[in-house]
Amino acid sequence: MKVFRLLVLLAVLILGLIIGAVNMTAMSINLLFTQLNTSVGVALIAALLIGVVVGAGLVLVSVVIPLYSQLRRANKSAVATPAPVASPNLLMDADRRWISSPSGSGSSCSFRWPHWPGG
């Protein structure tokens, strides 16, 4: 997957270089207090980059930040109300045999744990 991402990045970089090299016509962008002299290719790539940054910022503000705050509120409420701890209905005798079944019927089984620390 990393190789695929690297290839896509390289393809986009080469495409940007081709666009910049083909569109070498000079142009000037007049702003209120200044004038920018550049080529058409550079202006086109800069406009695309600014569009990506502005679009990512809008997605961050309108989607990611509200979902993150909702997740924090959900985590706070989950921590504030802990889940009830169920008492086990399985008991073992001194020989480490079950003396109560999972269904609670009281039948015994002779299953022994393979390794017990300290025993």
Image: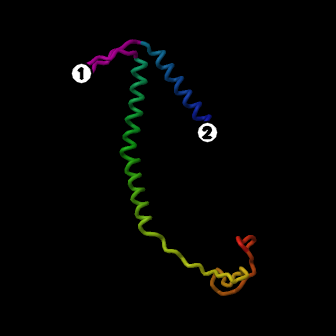
Q: What residue do we see at 39% from left, 21% from top?
A: 43
Main SS category, magenta section = strand
Residue type, numbered disc 1: Leu
What's the residue at 40%, 15% (across, down)?
39
Q: Is residue 27 within the magenta segment?
A: yes
Q: Residues within 10 Å of mark 1 (few under 14, many from 20)?
A: few
Measured from the top left, where is residue 26 in percent x and y? 38, 12
Q: Position of residue 16 (x, y in %)?
A: 49, 23
For label 1, the residue is 32
**Residue 101 x, y percent position in the rendering:** 66, 82
- Label whose residue precedes the other's in the sequence (1 or 2): 2
Q: Residue 57 sits in which quadrant? A: top left
Q: Which residue is mark 2?
A: 1
- Which residue is outermost to the front? 118
Q: Which mark is residue 75?
A: none
| SS under mark 1 | loop
**Which image quarter is the N terminus in?**
top right
User: Which x, y percent locates residue 24?
Assistant: 44, 13
**Front-most of 24 and 117?**
117
Q: Where is the C terminus found, in terms of image quarters? A: bottom right
Asked if the magenta segment contains residue 46, the reply would be no
Q: Which residues are magenta?
A: 25-39
Reply above or below: 82 against 69: below
Q: Please give the name of the residue rendered at 56% of the width and 27% of the height, measured from the top-left corner.
A: 10
Task: Indicate the secondary structure of the residue bearing disc 2.
Answer: loop
Q: Residues within 10 Å of mark 2 (few under 14, many from 20)?
A: few
Task: Tell me the amino acid under the disc marked 2.
Answer: Met
The structure's colour scheme is: rainbow
Count how many numbered circles sit on residues in the image.
2
